[in-house]
């Protein structure tokens, strides 16, 4: 592989903003890709994938290159040299890149790979938390899986098209996608490509959504005509799926504390041809109180550590803090206590997270059931989806029934 100077420089610039200014990796990659309109799809994937790789392996590569934050340009080029060497790419003789014998880099890689926190490139606290929560054996496999690049999975919008038809339409647009067993609405791309450019996307035939995430709406057991409240709807990944399963019939009230996310949800709903969603920003406690006792189904897709989605969001390894996780657990408990009141007697709710930590998942549910707020609830079923077992994002979902008559 020949390295192109402009692409490497764009990568290093993106890394500088991510590592030194705390900017989000996806936003900086987007910005880098806008730099030159002449770049083709290979050039673009070089920048995106190399940046994500170096973000993912930041700790390991920094140890190998013997560099520390804040990262000077020289140090960022050193990280890049480690990335290239470990992939067997010959280093170019540019003045920015110091000649480093590849033997030395590979030797240090082998040495550091004996220690999990370096091998998997994670902070000490995360490694300790993972072991404490999941046990050494499962954590070892899980963090390894969470460092793999996530596959691109589409969710067919069954309001507009069937899975088979979408598959052949995409084929005509040179995008090969295969059904995934056990995931009724999923098509997985054979090769990464920018599917947002396709006509099929513009026509609202699909959304990009991880396969395990697609299980949540089915788990909620919604039916056409029901009244559903999606309490933490965000930009509506799951709301749109629920709408499709409900065949656009009935009502979905989508709430979130951020109005801008709900605006994005409205945009997506329009493209998808969904018209049974009523978005409501939670700007006062009244918004939720008004809904008490009214819903057949409630979804709590709770804010969480996001540890289950590290493969698509590797910079979370460096942004997350243990204090944030402790606080978010308090929010999860408060949300469970309050939003469970939205259910009608006999109604069912699903509590879901994209975390693999039992303390955010089954332990939250157990504690809720033991509190006054949960006294009329019973656990119907739950699913613990590990990335190491399923090959998709780590997820948890539990269905609870309001047993009041
Ligand atoms: C896991 S994300 C939701 C993702 C979304 N359901 C989807 O499928 O695309 C959690 C959401 O909860 C929202 N949130 C945080 N605290 C909240 C609260 N107290 N009440 C309602 N929503 C909240 C966040 O803004 C965020 O959009």
Image: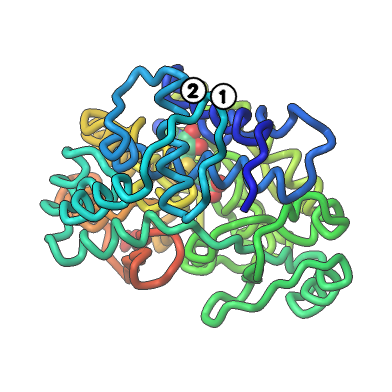
Tell me what residue is drawn at x 47 percent, y 54 percent. 87
Say what secondary structure mark 1 lies in.
helix
Q: Quadrant of residue 327?
A: top left
Q: Examine the rendering and report whether any part of residue 82 can be seen.
A: yes
Q: Position of residue 396 (x, y in %)?
A: 35, 59
Instruction: Give above or below for 206 relative to 38.
Output: below
User: Do the numbered discs 1 and 2 sit on residues whose CB atoms are within 8 Å?
Assistant: yes
Instruction: Give above or below for 52 relative to 249.
Output: above
Q: Which mark is residue 157?
A: none
Q: Quadrant of residue 78?
A: top left
Tell me what residue is drawn at x 55 percent, y 75 percent. 183
Instruction: Identify the residue position indicated by label 1 in the image.
Output: 13
Q: Position of residue 147 (x, y in %)?
A: 38, 54
Instruction: Identify the residue position indicated by label 2 in the image.
Output: 16
In the shown orientation, is residue 43 left or right of residue 170?
Answer: left
Pick the residue in front: 123 or 2: 2
């Amino acid at each position: 592989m020949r390295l192109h100077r402009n692409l490497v420089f764009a990568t290093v610039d993106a890394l500088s903003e991510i590592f030194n200014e705390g900017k989000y990796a996806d936003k900086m990659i987007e910005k880098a890709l806008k730099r030159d309109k002449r770049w083709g799809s290979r050039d673009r994937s070089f920048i995106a994938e190399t940046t994500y790789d170096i973000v993912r392996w930041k700790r390991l590569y920094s140890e190998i290159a013997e560099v520390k934050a804040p990262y000077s340009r020289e140090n960022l080029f050193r990280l890049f040299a480690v990335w290239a060497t470990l992939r067997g790419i010959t280093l170019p003789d540019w003045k920015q890149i110091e000649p480093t014998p590849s033997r030395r880099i590979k030797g240090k890689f082998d040495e550091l790979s004996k220690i999990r926190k370096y091998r998997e490139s994670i902070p000490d606290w995360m490694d300790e938390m993972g072991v404490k929560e999941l046990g050494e054996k499962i954590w070892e496999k899980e963090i390894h899986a969470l460092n793999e690049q996530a596959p691109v999975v589409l969710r067919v919008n069954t309001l507009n098209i069937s899975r088979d038809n979408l598959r052949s339409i995409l084929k005509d647009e040179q995008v090969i996608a295969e059904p995934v067993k056990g995931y009724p609405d999923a098509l997985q791309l054979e090769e990464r490509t920018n599917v947002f450019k396709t006509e099929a996307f513009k026509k609202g035939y699909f959304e990009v959504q991880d396969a395990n995430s697609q299980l949540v709406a089915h788990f909620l057991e919604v039916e056409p005509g029901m009244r559903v409240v999606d309490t933490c709807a965000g930009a509506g990944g799951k709301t749109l799926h629920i709408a499709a399963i409900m065949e656009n019939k009935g009502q979905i009230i989508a709430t979130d504390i951020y109005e801008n996310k709900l605006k994005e949800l409205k945009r997506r709903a329009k493209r998808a041809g969904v018209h049974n969603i009523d978005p409501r920003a939670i700007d006062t406690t009244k918004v939720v109180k008004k809904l008490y006792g009214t819903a057949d189904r409630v979804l709590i897709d709770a804010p969480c550590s996001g540890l289950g989605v590290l493969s698509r969001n590797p910079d979370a390894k460096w942004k997350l803090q243990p204090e944030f996780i402790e606080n978010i657990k308090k929010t999860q408990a408060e949300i469970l206590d309050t939003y469970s009141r939205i259910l009608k007697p006999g109604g069912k709710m699903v509590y879901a997270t994209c975390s693999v930590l039992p303390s955010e998942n089954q332990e939250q549910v157990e504690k809720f059931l033991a509190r006054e707020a949960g006294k009329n609830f019973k656990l119907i079923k739950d699913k613990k989806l590990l990335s190491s077992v399923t090959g998709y994002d780590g997820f948890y979902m539990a269905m609870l029934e309001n047993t009041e008559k």
